[in-house]
Amino acid sequence: MNRIPVWMDCDTGTDDAVAIMLAHASPELELLGISTAGGNTVQDLAYWNTQRLNGLLGTAYPVYRGAEKPLIRELKIATLFHGENGLGNVNLPVPENAVVPEENAWEALYACAKAHPGELRLVATAPLTNIAIALGLHPDLSELLHSILLMGGSAGAGNVTPAAEFNIHADPHAAGIVFRSGARLFMFGLDVTLQEALTADDLDELGSCGAKAGAFVRACLQCYMKGVRRYGLTGASMHDACPVMYLIHPELFEGELAGVAVELSGSVTVGKTVTDLYSDKQFPFKNATVMLKLDGDRFISILKERILSLG
Ligand code: BDR
Ligand code: CA
């Protein structure tokens, strides 16, 4: 089988952790590297949380340090959903044999894209700071990549403000660079990620099978569950797993090519991904496939199956 080469850029983060686990549990994919950025938690914790996952999974994915803070705005982390340590306050040990590469996130990503011209899928599940820096340093990256599949934005409502989704709101300047880069973009925004959610029963099922990976997912999502209940929701959407799922099961998703621009400065709209889907198509460009529909039941059942396959 020809495996699809994948790079992940994460702010690990509970649902980032689930996305990494899904990638690892998918033989269709070849995960070549993971870079980390500040977002859900500070960069240092996102970095070491990713290494901790290497320990849990028994893997040695190379993990590269990225940006500590957004390009211009201050970093605002999301402890309500991801806990004080980014992994829902679950303590995973740092593996003793953890290797810390010298290259930083953006140089490592560029080198990987050059080694796989036209093939590498970049899955971005954090604020887009690392990707914007990489594109700024290496403008040919947009052509070297097969595509960027990003969890972020929303054609409709936001989650951190009425207008904006967390990853884009955290670093709108970086997002603006990525959306203007000319790279082939797939946007997995709240429009589609909220169509799936793990319920408390799903988590119990994962946690009661005697599998280490499932038990970790149940434990690390307890804090996230408390967070979503405060907003009147009953399930935890695994936003960041959506672009990974698309790579293995694209038939679960429907999207439309549209113009997307990022609001950089509006006092109530900063971070909004203004999406030209519903107007008479006024933007003179169409720069992203905006995902709009998902078979949420299938998504959840495949996600659970793959996590349980990790043992
Ligand atoms: C996004 O924000 C983060 O909290 C999650 O990890 C996900 O990437 C959802 O808005
Ligand atoms: Ca994330």
Image (spheres, helix red, strand yellow):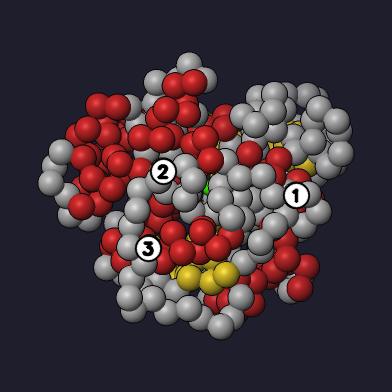
**Residue 54 shown left or right of residue 37 in the figure:** left
Q: Residue 165 at what x, y percent from top left?
A: 64, 35
Furthest-left residue in this view? 210
User: Image quadrant of residue 94?
Assistant: bottom left
Q: Relative to 294, is 91 above or below?
A: below
Taking the spot 69% from the left edge, 28% from the top edge, the residue there is 161
Mark 1 CB within 8 Å of ligand 1: no
Numbered disc 1: secondary structure:
loop
Could you tell me if residue 185 is visible in this image? no
Residue position marked by numbered label 3 in the rendering? 52
Decide which of tag 2 and tag 1 comes sooner along the chain: 1
How far apart are the alpha carbons under marks 3 and 2? Answer: 13 Å
Q: Is residue 14 left or right of residue 73?
A: left
Q: Residues within 10 Å of mark 1 (few under 14, many from 20)?
A: few
| Amino acid type of the residue that numbered disc 2 sits on in the rendered structure | Gly
| Residue denoted by label 2 | 88
State the image coordinates of residue 61 (x, y, percent, origin top left). 40, 71
User: With 81 as the anchor, is 288 left or right in this view?
Assistant: right
The residue furthest bottom is: 102
Which of the two labelled residues, at mark 1 and mark 3, occupies the earlier sequence position? 3
Q: Residue at x 25, y 51 (%)?
A: 213
Q: Is mark 3 within 8 Å of ligand 2?
A: no
Q: Label 3: state its secondary structure.
A: helix
